[in-house]
Amino acid sequence: MNDQPIRVRFAPSPTGPLHLGGIRTALYNYLFARQHNGTFILRIEDTDQSRFVPGAEEYVLEALRWCGLEADEDVNKGGPFAPYRQADRDEVYRNYVQVLVDRGHAYYAFDTPEELDDLRHQYQKEGQEQFQYNVTSRNQLKNSLTLPEVEVRQRMDRGDPFVIRILIPENQEVVFHDLIRGEVSVHTDNLDDKVLFKSDGLPTYHLANVVDDYLMKISHVIRGEEWLPSAPMHLLLYRFFGWESEMPRFAHLPLILKPDGHGKLSKRDGDRLGFPVYPLQWTDPDTGEVSRGFREEGYLPSAFINMLALLGWNPGTEQELFSLEELIHLFSLERIHKSGSKFDPEKAKWFNHQYLAHLPDEELAEMLVQLAVGSSQLAMGSLQLATHQFTRSPAHQLSDLVYARRIIPLIKDRITLIPDLWTNAWFFYFAPESYDLQVREKVWKPDTPQLVTSFTAEAEQLRVWTSESILQLVQDFTGRTGVKMGQLMMPLRLLVVGSNQGPGLMEIAEVIGKENFISRIKTGKSRGNS
Ligand code: GLU
C-alpha cells in the first residue's frame, strides 16, 4: 500500500432503515480504517429527494452507535470536509458538472419523462431491446448534441426543464482492478448516458458520489456488489475530471443471501421465517408497520457484529468468536469471498448465546433485574409471556441485584436472547398461577398427593435449607419409602414451577427459600392438584 492515508466512507442513502447488509458494509469499512489507523467517514447521500424517508438518517446514526461503529467524521461531528450531507453540498456539484459540460463529456438533454416513457413502451411493443439513452439513441433525441446551439440557449433561457447526461465514449474498454473481484472489464457500448444532474437542480448519486469521494480524499471504496455495474462509469468520471491517478481503490462486497441461498436476503424473508433483518426496530412512517430489530429481539451488539463479520469474510482458521479488537487485527479485504454468503438465523442465535454465556454474572444479573422490574409490562405480552400474568405481588423483590446474582449461574446456559433471562427466571420471583396440564397428566398419579404431603411435612422440619440438605432429605425419603426420585420430584416441580421446566429443583428450592417452597406446594395442591 502506498503512503496515502486510509480514508474510507460508509455512504447510505436515507431511503429507509438499514438492512443488516448495510451494517456489514459499515463494519468492513470500519475494520479496514481502524486496522490502518485511518479515518472512517459517514456520508449521507440524500440527493434523491423523491426517495427521502423521514427518520432514516437518525436511524442510521443510532444503528451505528448501537453497533459501536461510530464514524470519525459525520453529519453531527463534522470534520475537515464538512458538510457530510449531500443535500447541503449542492453548490459543489453544480460547478463540477459544468466542468464536464465545458470539456464535452456531458450534455444537456431536454426530453421529458413522458417522452422517454413513450419510447420505452414503443421499444417494448416492437420487441426491441430495452430502451437506453446511449450511443445509438442519443442522436435521435432532444439534446445539445442534436439541437442547434441557439435552440439550446433559448430553451435554457426560457427555463425549459433539462437534465445533464454523461457522454459515454464509443467503442472503448473500461478496465479496473477490484480488490475482491480482480480485473473487471466493461465495453462502453454497454453503458448508457446516465443522468448526472437532474432537472430539480440536484446531482444524481453517480456525480455526487464521485465528486465527494474525490474531495473527501477517499482512498478505498468498500461497498455492496449492487454498485459494481456503476463502477465503470464512475471510473470514466474520474478520467473526465482528470483525477484518475487519485482514484480510490474499489472493493465490491458479495451479497448476503437468503437462508436457502436462493437470492438476496430481504425483509420479507425475515417476516416469513421469523427473524429480524434490521439492526434496530423500524416504524414505517407511511404505513405505521413496525419491524423489530436485532436489538429488540435481545441480541448483544458484540454478537451481532461478530456474526456479520463472518458473513462474507473469514480469517482462514476455524475460529468463530472474535472481539472487535481481534477483528480489527485480522480483517483483510483479500479474504472477503467473491460469492454471496447465506444468512443463517440459527447461527446468529448461536453467536448471541455464546456472547451472553461469556458475560460476567454481575452484568447478566443487572439485565435480569431490568427485565424483572419491567415484568409487569412484560406480562402484558410484549415478550410473549402472556401465559404468566403476574397479578400477585412477587415473592421476592424484583430490584434485588444480590438475589438476581444467585439465579444467574443456574440459568445462564439456557439463554440465547436477552429476554430468555426472564422466561427462565420468572418462577424465582412469582409462584405459578397455572399448571401445565400435559405435564400434570403425565406425573400426577393416585398416590402423588399423599407422597407430596408427607415429604412436605418432613421438609418443613429441615433446619438447614440448602440444595445439598434438600437433596439429602429427598434421598432419605425415597430410600425409606421405596418411591423413585422422579415420582416425587416431578410433581414437586409442577407445583413449584408450574411445568417441567427450569434448572435443578433443589437449587430452585434453595434460592426461593423454604417458606416459598412449602407454600407453593400447599397452594398448588389446594388448587386441585390433589
Ligand atoms: N448511496 C449509496 C447507497 O445507498 C452508496 C453506494 C456507495 O457506497 O458508493 O448504497
Image (cartoon, helix red, strand yellow):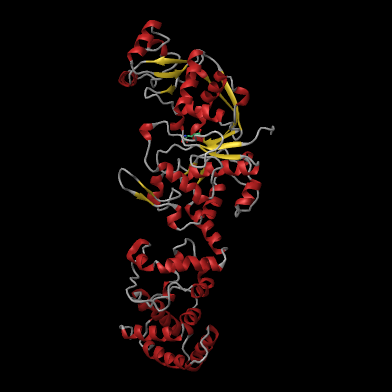
Would you place residue 218 above or below residue 521 in this image?
Answer: above
386 relative to 249 in the view: left or right: left
Question: Can you say which quadrant of the picture contains the C terminus?
Answer: bottom left
Percent coordinates x, y for residue 242 in the rendering: 58, 19
Instruction: Note whether residue 78 is visible.
Output: yes
Would you place residue 369 above or below residue 22 in this image?
Answer: below
The quadrant holding residue 394 is bottom left
The mark total stands at 0
Percent coordinates x, y for residue 129 in the rendering: 39, 20
Nearest the eye: 1 or 254: 1
Percent coordinates x, y for residue 180 in the rendering: 60, 35
The quadrant holding residue 107 is top left
Question: Can you say which quadrant of the picture contains the N terminus?
Answer: top right
Q: What's the residue at 33%, 16% (across, down)?
A: 160
Percent coordinates x, y for residue 43 in the rendering: 50, 37
Q: What's the residue at 41%, 86% (across, down)?
A: 518
Instruction: Note whether residue 260 is visible.
Output: no
31 relative to 55 in the view: left or right: right
Nearest the eye: 332 or 376: 376
Nearest the eye: 264 or 408: 408
Would you place residue 396 above or below residue 85 in this image?
Answer: below
